Amino acid sequence: MSSQRLLRSRCFLRLPAAMLRHYSLDASHPLLRTQGYVNGRWLSAASEFPVLDPATGKEIARVSDCGPEEAKQAVDAAYKAFHSWKRNSAKERSVVLRKWFDLMMLHKEELAELITYECGKPMAESLGEVVYSASFLEWFSEEARRVYGDFVPSPAKDRKILLLKQPVGVASIITPWNFPSAMITRKAAAALAAGCTVVVKPAEDTPLSALALAELAEKAGVPAGVFNVVPCSREKTPAVGEVLCTDPLVAKISFTGSTATGKLLLKMAADTVKKASMELGGHAPFIVFDSADVDKAVSGAMASKFRNSGQTCVCSNRFLVQSGVHDGFVDKLGRAMDAELRLGHGSEPGTTQGPLINTRAAEKVVNQISDAVSRGAKVLKGGKRLDGSFMEPTLLANVTTEMICTKEETFGPLLPVIRFNTEEEALAIANASNVGLAGYFFSQDVSQIWRVMEALEVGMVGVNEGLLSTPEAAFGGVKQSGLGLEGSKYGIDEYLEVKYMCFGGLKP
């Protein structure tokens, strides 16, 4: 067997044997909740929808299928609760959020198990998400006490000028399946810290994590109506989304998902001129220059591409490698893939690559590979779809910018490598996209680092680093990757409005 064929086969031998086992989520799981959560009460709907384990395709739970009526109840409850929650002192809100954080950390294994079964992530990654998710509660529990206004020098002696920050009101939070816990806390923690109340609409694939968060929020002392969750099926999502985006009592929308869906939500919110935050699609470039430390670049590529099987909005999507290091980088990358990647059910020890979220996601990756190969790309590793929604991690060489995988976000374990010659060429390719969320590059040339960092048309840049998300830093994109920021000291501003007070009639 040739070394190339060996590279392509070794990492996938475990999957068939592993998947012969029976996997199921224990019905007595301490944080498994299957009803909606509105106004501090668990709410059943007229019907239910199934939640599937993406690794097996089997049902793990049935969840209340909330519709427009339940969504309206949640909005009304949040609006009523807002008028009392906003009057709590910043310290009081801070204490509640901190208790919520403590409970998440206390139950991190149980929360991680829910993520693995409904999302497919390996347990190590699920645990990492829980810690990341909880960190936003911790961060914004601290930021709640740092919402400062301004005292502005007045041009007139008989008046004083003050700028105050106040919560906007009810926030609708619509989240994706790929980080079913962290995408909720990143928004909700900022909202509650500011004094807002929220209605959460989790993705239909992953409602269990949202409902577990509601259970812990209640135990932490979050008052009734402040945090509401309305799970629903794919069929009811448009109607529920319409309520959350058009109801006059909703003041703010925060959405993470595709650019196409974000545009629809913005249109619905326009009639009532709602404040909106949109964290939308990415198509991140990953550039390796001749001056790079190739070993570090390979490590960065592995971390950036294969986390959650390539299903993150900041995953590197287009790999641009300069001619001088191209062959060495591709060779080392293939070896790293062979040594480090293991497919299987996320609950299996040693699994690093779980399934894609559903068969549609796997079909998209297959189509991108087929298109690339038909246009001259060479499959160096992987390239095949396995049972269900499992996909072999795939390494492509001889990739050109005419291929679909360089034009559209993949959301899967596909790594296409484009060879380039000059810095200008790399930047032109990297910036030839209508989205700009994250970008990465590896270089040891200080002057080049500053030039490229400033020239990349993205909201976040990783320099010699493949992982960049942290609650302390601002998360957001440019172009059609969205509006507003999450995390950092700026994240809470998305849920605040500035009020100007002119205090006149003073005696000089």
Image: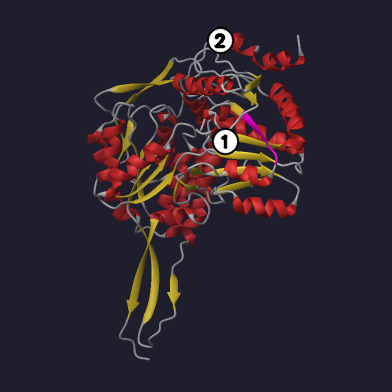
Per the image, the residue denoted by label 2 is 21
- Identify whether 504 is placed above or below 31: below
- Identify whether 248 is placed above or below 110: below
- Give the Cα distance between marks 1 and 2: 31 Å
Q: Let me know if residue 418 is in the magenta part.
A: yes
- Amino acid bearing label 1: Cys
**Residue 275 position within the rendered picture, expressed as x and y whole percent measured from the top left:** 35, 52
Question: On the image, which quarter does residue 73 sit in?
Answer: top left
Is residue 297 toward the left or the right of residue 52 in the image?
A: right
- Amino acid bearing label 2: Arg
> Looking at the image, which residue is at 66% across and 20% down?
381
Is residue 278 or residue 454 the one in the foreground? 454
Q: Which mark is residue 481?
A: none
**Residue 500 position within the rendered picture, expressed as x and y whole percent measured from the top left:** 35, 70
Q: Let me know if residue 284 is in the magenta part.
A: no
> Looking at the image, which residue is at 31% across and 26% down?
64
The span shown in magenta is 416-421
Crowding at mark 1 (Cα within 10 Å: few <14, some 14-19, many 20+):
many
- Identify whether 446 is placed above or below 37: below
Per the image, the residue denoted by label 1 is 315
Q: Residue furthest bottom?
A: 508
Element assignment for label 1: loop
